[in-house]
Image (tube, helix red, strand yellow):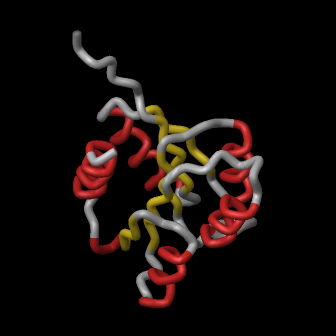
Amino acid sequence: MAEIQTIKRILLVEDEPMLGNLLKQRLEKENYQVVQARDGAEAVKVLKQEQTDLVLLDIILPKMSGFEVMEAINSDPSIHSAPVVIISNLGQEGDVERGQRLGAVGYFIKAQLSIEELISKIGEFFASK
């Protein structure tokens, strides 16, 4: 009997509408269910209400930074935790280390990664689970 493939839910936290919509469309084309949040506070609200399989998190966000979102995930038991992959333009070593220290399973710098490469990395992540 074939294993039933469950659709993976991804929370995409990106405040840049064009990039957010492009990523959402591309992820949905790969049969992921995508929930979008445009700022950090909205991301925390979604995580309190819904279970997700992965969080794609920008760092520079309105209302609450991505780092603050990760701190909230780590400190608030009412927030559904999910693996976090950071996608940001912040590429300083200190930023990457802070993201890893807060529990990010991946850290990708937008300028160094195409959408196709990101989609591939997400597929690899789910395949390894």
Q: Position of residue 121 (x, y in %)?
A: 27, 55
Q: Position of residue 46 (x, y in %)?
A: 68, 43
Q: Nearer the viewer, residue 2 or 91?
A: 2
Instruction: Choose top left, top right, bottom left or bottom right for residue 109.
Output: bottom left
Q: In the picture provided, is 126 more to the left or to the right than 39?
A: left
Q: Nearer the viewer, residue 16 or 14?
A: 14
Q: Is residue 83 above or below residue 92?
A: above
Q: In the picture provided, is 42 more to the left or to the right than 22?
A: right
Instruction: Choose top left, top right, bottom left or bottom right for residue 60.
Output: bottom right
Q: Nearer the viewer, residue 122 or 75?
A: 75
Looking at the image, the residue that sits furthest to the top is 1
Q: Position of residue 114 (x, y in %)?
A: 26, 61
Q: Residue at x 52, y 67 (%)?
A: 103
Q: Which part of the image, by quadrant, shows the N terminus?
A: top left
Q: Residue at x 33, y 41 (%)?
A: 26
Q: Nearer the viewer, residue 46 or 76?
A: 76
Q: Which part of the image, by quadrant, shows the C terminus?
A: top left
